[in-house]
Image (cartoon, rainbow, N blue to C red):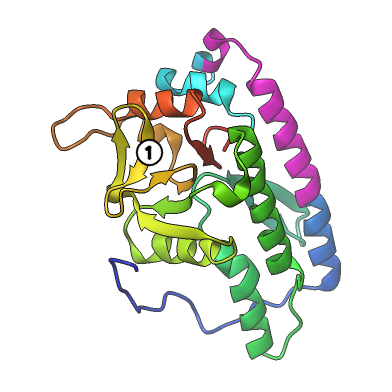
Amino acid sequence: MLLTEQASPYALYHCQQVSPQTIREIKQASEVVGCVLMQAWSVIRNLDEEALLYYGFPEESIRLVKYDALAPFCMRLDWCWNEQTGVKKVVETNPQTPSFWFECTVGNHRVAEHFGLRSPDVNAHDTLKFTLNQHIKRAAVFLDKPFEECEVVFTTLNNAEDLGTMQWLSSHVHRSTIMPMEFLRIQDGKCLFDQRTGKSIDILFMWYPLEWAIHDTDENGERLWPALEKLILERKVVIVNFGSA
């Protein structure tokens, strides 16, 4: 259950119409950009520590960045796409905190339907569901544990938008649960677990940037990252969409 309840709309009553040709071009361009970024990720993972520090990676993150072999689950590309001037640029790619995934799939389809328009991508939702399950199953293989025996948890900050999105994502994965991040606990360096139930966590889909996690502390001011990093490197937990993102 969500701890935060909020029912405030935050959108205009409007649907921007886009030509089928533009939609095809954006899809094609996005696939190409995605391939470039994935290639860049494979290069980055093989750079030495000095190079990663030069490019701005926090020192505490480097071991995990080089270790995390699981590709990001999804990247949301924000485009500057001006058909009149011909300017077509990616201004941001957002894989770590994947806001607007619901809006880009189910929400977009429902808005188009409401205004009597055709959905720009009728397969988006099915693609997301299939891809998410594939990533969770790959995490189980990486953990060397049968998927059916894995405890799968989705977690993020305790606010309506983030938890709402994660609740929606988790509904696509059989036998998964959702929890706010404040209930995550580490037990004697042996496992990550849910404070409320005591259940250990095998696979964690965490919607939270790595560059924030490395600075987190407990109520006594003790840094939490060294213990979490140790669990990850020892394959006692697999975090999907984290270091690679």
Is residue 144 shown above or below 173? above
Is residue 190 shown above or below 19? above
Residue at (43%, 17%) from the top-left corner? 59
The C terminus: image quadrant: top right
Residue at (38%, 34%) from the top-left corner? 191
Give percent across and percent down for residue 94: 56, 47
Give percent across and percent down for residue 78: 62, 53
- Where is mark 1, residue-wise? 192
Disc 1: CA contacts within 10 A as few (<14), some (14-19) or many (>=20): many
Return the residue nearer the eye: 241 or 59: 241
Return the residue nearer the eye: 210 or 195: 195
The N terminus: image quadrant: bottom left
Return the residue nearer the eye: 113 or 166: 166
**In screen coordinates, is 202 left or right of 141?**
left
Residue type, numbered disc 1:
Leu
**In screen coordinates, is 43 left or right of 170?**
right
Residue at (34%, 23%) from the top-left corner? 226
Give percent across and percent down for residue 17: 71, 77
Is residue 185 shown above or below 125? above
**In screen coordinates, is 57 left or right of 122?**
left
Q: Main secondary structure of the magenta part?
A: helix
Q: Which quadrant holds residue 185?
A: top left
**Residue 75: in sight, yes or no?**
no
